[in-house]
Image (cartoon, rainbow, N blue to C red):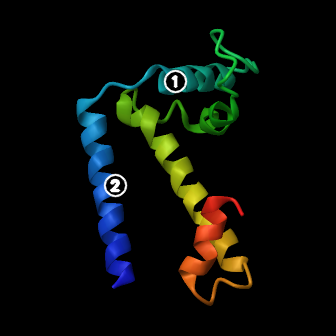
Amino acid sequence: MVSAGIGLALWFRIALFSAGCANMPATDDECIIALQAKQISRGEFSLLMLAQPYLFPLEAYLMAPVVNLLPHTAFGVRVMAFGFGLISLFLGWCVFRRRPDTHSDLSRTLIPILAGH
């Protein structure tokens, strides 16, 4: 039952992702990260770009090796962020599974983590 719910949630997320790529243009922050990744792939190693001090280039450095392989569309800009989100979700799940008290009641463990206690 849980795996069916997870599968349905993943299908819904992928459907929304594909609809968003087809119907919505990329935002400024997404485009700036892609432009910075292109500059990094050319050998320019900057820390800030276009007077955007809040955008640290970690995503741009991670995106730089494959930025020229991606299409120059909203999908090409968003697929890396989607992939980073999946990796973060997986790593968070791995950390959650390593907690010794996770094999007991899930709500008793998850609520304090989300509440910051």
Screen quadrant of the N terminus? bottom left
Instruction: Judge whether residue 24 can be spotted in this image.
Output: yes
Q: How many marks?
A: 2
Q: Position of residue 13 (x, y in %)?
A: 34, 55
In which image quadrant can residue 103 be found? bottom right
Residue under pointer 1: 29
Q: Residue, x 47% and y 47% (percent of image)?
A: 82
Q: Residue furthest bottom?
A: 104
Label ID, residue 16? none
Q: Residue, x 36% and y 63% (percent of image)?
A: 10
**Nearest the eye: 7 or 113:** 113
Q: CA distance from mark 2 to mark 1?
A: 21 Å
Q: Residue furthest top?
A: 51
The numbered mark, 2 or 1, whose residue comes first in the sequence reads 2
The secondary structure type at the circle numbered 2 is helix
The secondary structure type at the circle numbered 1 is helix
Q: Where is 69 relative to 49, above or below?
A: below
Q: Position of residue 117 (x, y in %)?
A: 72, 64
Residue under pointer 2: 13
